[in-house]
Amino acid sequence: MATPALDDPPLFNAMLTPHQSLSPKGFWFVMGGVALISFTAGMVFWAQGAWPVCGFFGLDVALVYFAFRASYRSGHLYETLRLTRSELAIQRVLPSGQTRSWSFQPYWLRVHIDEPPVPGSQLTLTSHGRSLVIGSFLSPGERVELARALRTALSRARDWAPG
């Protein structure tokens, strides 16, 4: 018996990931700059006799560090979309490693997004009374581009006739 993946090749395959604008090297460069500025300002206050203020500058550095780490952690989220003639399979992997999966029949699936997009526009897949928002971490333009590509692939899946 053949595997389903060989019987039904993908018509559309995508992996959606959040944009990470700062590389790890850039992160350490920014943290070094924040620490240097905080240390310098702390020494100015120390020299004026306001030494307790130095602790707040250290707290600022720690908070910036933890904010960046939380941002990098959220960057581990991703979604995969795999469209075959028989289904659109969506898998979302959260930063915790937890996985959620959905499956839609392509013939009945509708793709909706506001055009032109606004920052709050959502890319929504709807079928048989069920809706799913995908790519919420993408920019509005990227969501529109994904919606167009997905609509094109869905059209190809619907037009296919078994032969």
Image: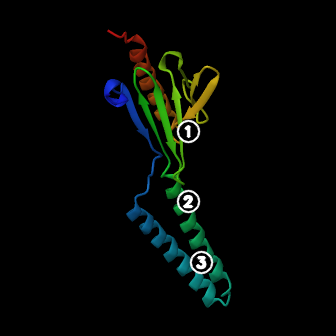
Alpha-carbon distance for marks 3 and 1?
35 Å
Mark toward the viewer: 3 or 2: 2
Who comes first in sequence, dot 3 or dot 2? 3
Quadrant placement of the N terminus: top left
Mark 1 surroundings within 10 Å by alpha-carbon count, few (fewer than 14), some (14 through 19), many (20 or more):
some
Mark 3 surroundings within 10 Å by alpha-carbon count, few (fewer than 14), some (14 through 19), many (20 or more):
some
Amino acid type assigned to the residue bearing label 1 in the image: Ser
Dot 3 corresponds to which residue?
58
Residue drawn at (49%, 34%) of the image = 90
Element on which disc 1 rests: loop
Vertical order, 81 against 104 (above or below)? below
Element on which disc 3 rests: helix
108 vs 137, nearest the viewer: 108
Who comes first in sequence, dot 3 or dot 1? 3
Mark toward the viewer: 3 or 1: 1
Quadrant placement of the C terminus: top left
Alpha-carbon distance for marks 2 and 1?
18 Å
Vertical order, 124 against 29 (above or below)? above
Amino acid type assigned to the residue bearing label 3 in the image: Gly
- Residue furthest front in the image: 1
Who comes first in sequence, dot 2 or dot 1? 2
Mark linked to residue 136:
1
The colouring scheme, among rainbow, by chain, secondary structure or one colour, is: rainbow
Q: Is residue 24 visible?
A: yes
Mark linked to residue 70:
2
Q: Is residue 122 visible?
A: no
77 vs 162, nearest the viewer: 162
Vertical order, 28 against 141 (above or below)? below
Residue 7 is situated, as x and y percent measured from the top left of the image, at 33, 24
Amino acid type assigned to the residue bearing label 2 in the image: Ala
